[in-house]
Image (cartoon, grey):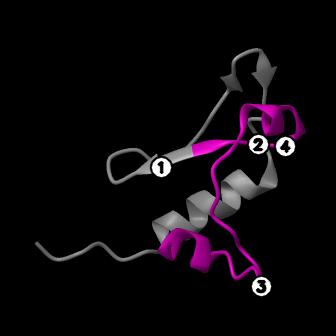
Amino acid sequence: MLLLQSLGTPKQITAPVRIDDVPNMAAAFATNTTIGVRSVYALDDVQFSQDHPVLDALRDGYAGIPGDRL
């Protein structure tokens, strides 16, 4: 959730994505502690922009989150 909060957007929702919603999506991404933020090229036969501005915003936000001390 820190990643979404780092975007500074006023409203955010987290919800499952239904397959019927996919064609209406402008971009898609995956994230975890190993890969950071990676754009998703396609889901089934629906292709997504690889240079959508939200992807850069997410990558910048991810880079700004301090790591946890182990």
Residue assigned mark 3? 10
**Is residue 34 positioned above or below 14 on the image?**
above
Q: Are marks 2 and 1 in contact (CB under 8 Å)?
A: no
- Residue range of the region highlighted in magenta in the rendering: 1-29
Quick one: SS at disc 1? Answer: strand
Q: Is residue 12 left or right of residue 60?
A: right
Please say whether residue 37 is visible from this viewpoint.
Answer: no
Residue 26, numbered label: 4
Quick one: SS at disc 2? Answer: loop
Q: 39 or 60, which lies in front?
A: 39
Residue 70, given in percent of the width and then of the height, sits at: 10, 72
Residue assigned mark 1? 31
Q: Residue 28, located in which quarter of the rendered image?
A: top right
Residue 20 on the magenta span: yes
Residue plotted at (68% across, 24% down): 43
Q: Amino acid at mark 1?
A: Thr
Residue assigned mark 2? 27
Q: Are marks 4 and 2 in contact (CB under 8 Å)?
A: yes
